[in-house]
Amino acid sequence: MAEFEVLVEVQLRPGIADPQGATIERALPALGFSGVSGVRAGKAFRLRVEAAGPAEAREVAEALSARLLANPVIEEATVRVLTLGEAGPVLG
Amino acid sequence: MAEFEVLVEVQLRPGIADPQGATIERALPALGFSGVSGVRAGKAFRLRVEAAGPAEAREVAEALSARLLANPVIEEATVRVLTLGEAGPVLG
């Protein structure tokens, strides 16, 4: 068994109103950022999953996301099993 | 100029208390998920950035994250420029 670092991204489904994302997008031009569109605000969860391989870690994370982390009526979850070097922050 | 899909992950810095993540982690064994640890709850933002290349898209997203999306005192932001096939949700 090894431990896998997993990132679960939860976003509102397309078509569901996202006032937080829309507000950020409207603020950008006044702050000097042009050419940015399609802003969506959601949730990011990090987990360490003990599993025999990355496929099993993904399965556990997907089951867990569907049951606990996302509301399937309005949200969708994307699971990424991170490889070494991908796990750390880019901005300190 | 092309459009790049960017994922910005904002997590609390290591050492900053994360009660939401801790609560999820404590609930997991009773729900049948064992072997999951290190749960952290943060924010995920999606942006479409117009740029000449992925490096420029990343620069814009990093500047924007540092100024708008993360509180650098307690949070850190990770920017990923997504390639085709990586952008969509895994769970529908």
Image (cartoon, coloured by chain):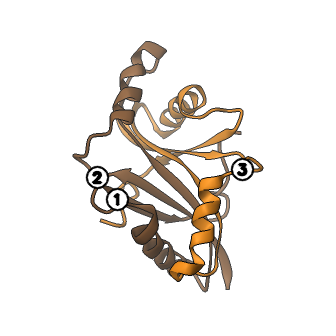
Chain colours: A orange, B brown
Q: Which image quadrant: the N terminus of chain B? A: bottom right
Can residue B82 be seen from the camera position used here?
no
**Image point (66%, 40%), residue name:** A75
**Image point (51%, 53%), residue name:** B44
Looking at the rendered structure, the secondary structure element under dot 2 is loop
Say which quarter of the image contains residue A91.
bottom left
Q: Position of residue B8 (x, y in %)?
A: 49, 60
The numbered mark at residue B76 is 1
Q: CA distance from mark 1 to mark 2?
A: 6 Å
User: Is residue B30 or residue A26 the one in the foreground?
Assistant: A26
Q: Residues within 10 Å of mark 1 (few under 14, many from 20)?
A: many
Looking at the rendered structure, the secondary structure element under dot 1 is strand
Q: Residues within 10 Å of mark 3 (few under 14, many from 20)?
A: few
Are callouts 3 and 2 both on one chain? no
Are callouts 3 and 1 both on one chain? no
The numbered mark at residue A17 is 3
Tell me, yes or no, whether the two marked residues, 1 and 2, touch with CB atoms within 8 Å. yes
Question: Mark 2 belongs to which amino acid?
Answer: Arg
From the viewer's perspective, tell me whether residue B66 is left or right of residue B50: left
The numbered mark at residue B13 is 2
| Viewer-nearest of discs 3 and 1 | 3
| Dot 3: chain letter | A
**Image point (61%, 58%), residue name:** A21
From the viewer's perspective, tell me whether residue A90 is left or right of residue A78: left
**Image point (50%, 64%), residue name:** B80
From the viewer's perspective, tell me whether residue A26 is left or right of residue B70: right
| Dot 2: chain letter | B
Q: Earlier in the sequence, mark 1 or mark 2?
A: 2
Q: Position of residue B5 (x, y in %)?
A: 62, 66
